Image (spheres, coloured by chain):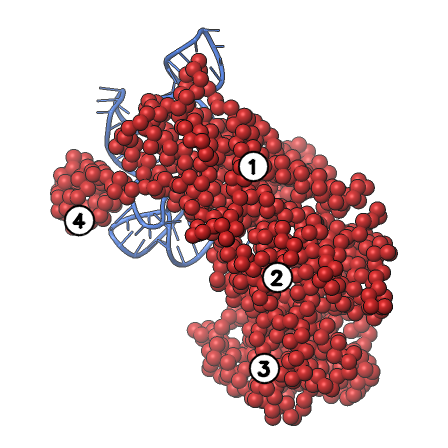
Chain colours: A red, B blue
RNA sequence: GCCCCCGUGGCGGAAUGGCAGACGCUUCGGACUUAAAAUCCGAUGGCCAGAAAUGGCCGUGCGGGUUCGAAUCCCGCCGGGGGCACCA
């Protein structure tokens, strides 16, 4: 008789809630218990509800948490809602309801769905990023950023007051561009500083300039920058939110335009964000993604002077123009400097107007206009090199040779210095450009073997320098060093490091986000709202639509916007923070969710941090996971948190794909073709949902996929074919679940039909947590059978009698006892390593051994139930109660295994002859090698293989096998 | 184009230098049943021999190598997935 999962699951979920079974203890109450902070990436509560991917990660952390509780850990395992953001707001606009109402409804639904899975969260610690009591502290952390700067002496964030001190004391000086740097005089560089001092001292600045310098150094600052403006969403987006020139949310077109926006100075942390990855137990691939995103390159800056030319005045025509007739390039290959035969500036480079002679002005302007109108998308699809000669020449810093100066859009104004020295012989892009524009190509590096670089291609690898008087015959690595040293001696350049990472664009022109705790004066300069006035609550608005212009919706809240402080009138900042703000620090709030005085109590923070296990999707590799590391480091520098990194160990759960689909392909005329004949089978969107399209290998004709019934498919050889027509090969693959494809699995239906315990077991049994794997509803029955069988084995299978425990007192039979100890070892180790599929297999195996064996010894029965508990907690609690316990097993000690019980008294050893298995022998576990070899040689099925042969070698791998080498 | 990961039965997967295919699904046969479902028992990588017990050969994408021994390590290729993509 199957057990009634509906009743049992409801009963125990209510019990756990009523008894606060999973409440984490505050450090003061925890005594000597070790702590474990086990964290899920909290969900964005969308209107579509939970999908089956959410429970995958949540169940994994739940099993781990339940296991650690039984191992005596004080476990913090919380859940909350990342609820600000675009989808709820879009829905609200379309349906004319307030986003807060829509969000609350979605949260209710998500909470219901998550709770029906029986996850052991401490619900007393639930957080919601849209709750003013939460975002009060998001705003507070923003003010920490606003009130700090990155100190170049200490390489960390410091309060802004310290910056004033350092400037006043002249430890720091102000550069020509308003940047702050270490006073060269403090570094023993007086002679350079004395020669031409381009920096200015604090006392030389006017109060206005002083304020600009301070504001310009803040970790949160306002700047006019080229941004990603998305007209359809009516907001700007960060680089991380733009994929292939389109918005990550909604796939809308994005254009670049300069706007005045809030920025966060994440670039100051680029080095530490790279270096500290080494402290983390994260998937190597994910660390690599962060390293690539930060994009650290080491090399040199090299200065180039412009050759004097007619029509180019030696002094600037206006104040806006740069007064220096020189520019700086960045290169990772200073050793190839002798091979630089031209230079390229980005089309947006400020020097171009200054140096272009009248004869070339028209051509240059035309090219710049063309580049400006080109979309990012077009730029990505068409990488044919374009550019134009400016008519100007640069002087080679070593040879003094005149080399032509081009502008081209393959040089990006946003990276390095926006200018390059082009070495066509040793750079693919420069090579392509030089060939197209017929520019000299000069080889300065030869492969170490002395072979000539292949024709028609640049030699980009390392080798030995040639045609380079200063560094001839030096291998690349040494050549670089020698060249940098020379450049520094001659003041022609210097060692340099650059990053791909840009500062984080932090403001959005939307309503549904955290307001900035900032007031703007009449010159639009920012002032912090006093901490005592936090939270700055989002004003209620009936019309919260984006304006379609860069003017944010909050400007419509006119009463809210105007404030007066100390007789002065200010305007509130009307941009809002991006979706990611709330998720940057939510893990810290779980530690102390109701604290009204601080964002987290320091003693509690010190106890719980860092997060011991963090599980979530890989889609946050460069968004949430980079942003929150950055915020955490700022908080660490300022002394608000105790660890340099927030998440010690991280696992990405693999995507769950839809059920396997089978497609045949037909042409427009209805003729069918085998999938094997096609190339480039890919998905194309249509109004009816995506469909499969393939191109015929020979004819190039387009074929469209037709879905076929899996029952009509079989495998022949290495391919799938139709049973009804084996000449037609079938394409078999699983796709990402999507509404438009109609292959989404709804967790409500699975839990309703099979129960939460079965659902949990099924998802954990599908395969390794990290692996991508297809959903297969048919397989669920296996887990139903397993739990039903457990129920029968423990509670009796007599349908006419009421269920009662099928248990006897007394010792466990020896073979079962050994199996039990092995299971205790295996299941415990597997859970610790998050290998749930093999842990479940071990439990199934043990249960199979109990099947049909009569009453179960109590000790074995209890241990089995305890091991089952993390995976199928409802059923386990019910059985535990039936076994006579009146308390939940949630904190009952995990069973212990006895290593002595694992040892077999006799061993079954495989015997190989020349590496091929021929027989197995039974030997006493303590037999010596000689005895074992003799037994092996005389084994019945081994002897025929030895006849007439000489044994060359006898190998015995202790307790593993015997291998006899004969010839 | 560059970087990373992965290719094992009809399917999901196990084994990470030592018995390939644990465990689950599927399929087939049997038991129970008036019947069906559920449940239980047995078989289930391919080929060959045998009435059977059983035995042999082949087999972890393909080709080579290292090793007494390779799914596992190394080299080259093919296929799939992911990331980055004019980053100097």
Q: Nearer the viewer, mark 4 or mark 1?
A: 1
Which mark sits nearer the N-terminus, 4 or 2?
2
Q: Residues within 10 Å of mark 1 (few under 14, many from 20)?
A: some
Q: Secondary structure at mark 1?
A: helix
How far from the left and from the top, in percent, is residue A586?
61, 53
Classify A474 as above or below B75.
below
How far from the left and from the top, in percent, is residue A197?
67, 89
Q: Which residue is mark 1?
A: A17
Q: Secondary structure at mark 4?
A: strand
Which mark sits nearer the N-terminus, 3 or 2?
3
Q: Secondary structure at mark 3?
A: strand
Q: Nearer the viewer, mark 4 or mark 2?
A: 2
In the rendered structure, the answer to whether residue A240 lies left or right of residue B33 reads right
> What is the chain letter for disc 4?
A
Q: Which residue is mark 2?
A: A631
Can marks 2 and 1 be said to lie on one chain? yes
Q: Is residue A758 visible?
A: yes
In the rendered structure, the answer to whether residue A351 lies left or right of residue A294 reads right
Please give the count of numbered marks on the rendered protein: 4
Q: Nearer the viewer, residue A721 or A552?
A: A552
Q: Which residue is mark 3?
A: A494
Q: Which residue is mark 4?
A: A954
Q: Nearer the viewer, residue A403 or A922?
A: A922
């Amino acid at each position: 008789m199957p057990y009634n999962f509906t009743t049992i699951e409801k009963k125990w979920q209510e019990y756990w809630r009523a008894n606060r079974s999973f409440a984490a203890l505050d450090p003061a109450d925890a005594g000597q218990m070790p702590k474990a902070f086990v964290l899920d990436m909290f969900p964005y509560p969308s209107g579509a509800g939970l999908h089956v991917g959410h429970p995958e990660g949540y169940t994994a952390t739940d099993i781990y948490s339940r296991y650690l509780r039984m191992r005596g850990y004080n476990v913090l395992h919380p859940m909350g809602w990342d609820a600000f953001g675009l989808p709820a707001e879009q829905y609200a606009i379309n349906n004319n309801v307030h986003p807060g109402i829509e969000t609350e409804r979605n949260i209710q639904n998500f909470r219901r769905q998550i709770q029906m899975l029986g996850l052991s969260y401490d619900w007393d610690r639930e957080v919601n990023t849209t709750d003013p009591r939460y975002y009060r502290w998001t705003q507070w952390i923003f003010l920490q950023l606003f009130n700090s700067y990155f100190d170049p002496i200490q390489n960390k964030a410091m309060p802004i007051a310290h910056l004033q001190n350092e400037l006043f004391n002249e430890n720091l000086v102000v550069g020509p561009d308003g940047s702050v740097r270490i006073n060269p005089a403090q570094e023993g560089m007086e002679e350079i500083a004395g020669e031409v001092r381009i920096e200015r001292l604090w006392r030389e600045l006017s109060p206005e300039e002083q304020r600009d310098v301070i504001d310009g150094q803040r970790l949160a600052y306002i700047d006019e920058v080229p941004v990603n403006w998305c007209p359809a969403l009516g907001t700007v987006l960060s680089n991380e939110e733009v994929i292939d020139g389109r918005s990550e949310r909604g796939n809308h077109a994005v254009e670049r335009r300069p706007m005045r926006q809030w920025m966060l100075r994440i670039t100051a942390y680029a080095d530490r964000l790279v270096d500290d990855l080494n402290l983390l137990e994260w998937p190597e691939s994910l660390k690599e993604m962060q390293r690539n995103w930060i994009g650290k390159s080491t090399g040199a800056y090299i200065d180039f002077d412009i050759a004097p030319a007619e029509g180019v005045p030696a002094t600037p025509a206006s104040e806006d123009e740069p007064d220096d007739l020189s520019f700086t390039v960045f290169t990772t290959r200073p050793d190839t400097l002798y091979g630089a035969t031209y230079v390229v500036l980005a089309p947006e480079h400020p020097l171009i107007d200054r140096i272009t002679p009248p004869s070339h002005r028209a051509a240059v302007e035309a090219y710049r206009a063309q580049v400006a109108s080109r979309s990012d998308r077009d730029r990505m699809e068409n990488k044919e090199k374009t550019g134009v000669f400016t008519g100007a020449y640069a002087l080679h810093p070593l040879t003094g040779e005149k080399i032509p100066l081009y502008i081209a859009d393959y040089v990006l104004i946003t990276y390095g210095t926006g200018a390059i020295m082009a070495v066509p012989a040793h750079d693919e892009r420069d090579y392509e450009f030089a060939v197209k524009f017929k520019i000299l190509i000069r080889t300065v590096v030869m492969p170490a073997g002395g072979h000539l670089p292949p024709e028609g291609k640049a030699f980009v690898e390392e080798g030995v320098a040639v045609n380079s008087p200063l560094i001839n015959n030096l291998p690349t690595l040494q050549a670089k060093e020698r060249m940098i040293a020379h450049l520094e001696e001659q003041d022609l350049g210097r060692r340099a490091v650059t990053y791909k990472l840009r500062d984080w664009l932090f403001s959005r022109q939307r309503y549904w986000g955290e307001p900035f705790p900032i007031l703007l004066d009449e010159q639009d300069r920012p002032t912090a709202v006093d901490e005592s006035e936090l939270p700055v609550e989002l004003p209620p608005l009936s019309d919260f639509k984006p304006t379609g212009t860069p003017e944010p919706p909050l400007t419509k809240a006119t009463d809210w916007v105007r404030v007066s402080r100390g007789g002065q009138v200010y305007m509130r900042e009307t941009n809002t923070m991006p979706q990611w703000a709330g998720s940057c620090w939510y893990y810290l709030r779980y530690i102390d969710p109701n604290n009204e005085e601080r964002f987290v109590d320091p003693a509690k923070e010190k106890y719980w941090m860092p997060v011991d296990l963090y599980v979530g999707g890989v889609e946050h590799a460069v968004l949430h996971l980079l942003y929150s590391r950055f915020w955490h480091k700022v908080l660490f520098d300022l002394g608000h948190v105790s660890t340099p990194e927030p998440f010690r160990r991280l696992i990405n759960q693999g995507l769950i794909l839809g059920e396997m689909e089978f497609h045949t392909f037909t042409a427009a005329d209805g003729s069918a073709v085998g999938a094997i004949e096609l190339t480039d089978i890919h998905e194309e969107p249509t109004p009816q949902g995506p469909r499969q399209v393939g191109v015929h290998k020979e004819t190039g004709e387009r074929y469209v996929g037709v879905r076929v019934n899996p029952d009509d498919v079989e495998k022949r050889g290495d391919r799938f074919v139709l049973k009804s027509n084996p000449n037609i090969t079938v394409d078999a693959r699983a796709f990402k679940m999507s509404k438009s494809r109609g292959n989404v699995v709804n967790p409500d239906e699975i839990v309703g039909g099979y129960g939460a315990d079965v659902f949990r077991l099924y998802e954990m049994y599908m395969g390794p947590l990290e692996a991508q794997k297809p959903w297969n509803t048919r397989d669920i029955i296996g887990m139903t059978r397993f739990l039903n069988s457990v129920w029968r084995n423990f509670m009796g299978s007599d349908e006419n009698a009421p269920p009662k425990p099928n248990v006897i007192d007394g010792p466990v039979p020896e073979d079962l006892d050994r199996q039990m100890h092995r299971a205790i070892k295996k299941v415990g180790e597997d859970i610790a390593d998050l290998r749930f599929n093999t842990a479940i297999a071990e439990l199934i195996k043990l249960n199979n051994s109990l099947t049909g064996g009569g009453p179960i010894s109590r000790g074995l029965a209890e241990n089995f139930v305890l091991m089952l508990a993390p995976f199928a907690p409802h059923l386990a609690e019910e059985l535990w109660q039936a076994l006579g316990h009146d308390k939940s097993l949630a904190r009952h000690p995990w069973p212990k295994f006895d290593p002595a019980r694992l040892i077999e008294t006799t061993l079954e050893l495989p015997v190989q002859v020349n590496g091929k298995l021929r027989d197995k022998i039974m030997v006493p576990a303590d037999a010596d090698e000689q005895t074992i070899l003799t037994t092996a040689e005389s084994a019945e099925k081994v002897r025929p293989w030895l006849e007439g042969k000489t044994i060359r070698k006898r190998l015995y791998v202790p307790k593993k096998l015997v291998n006899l080498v004969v010839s």
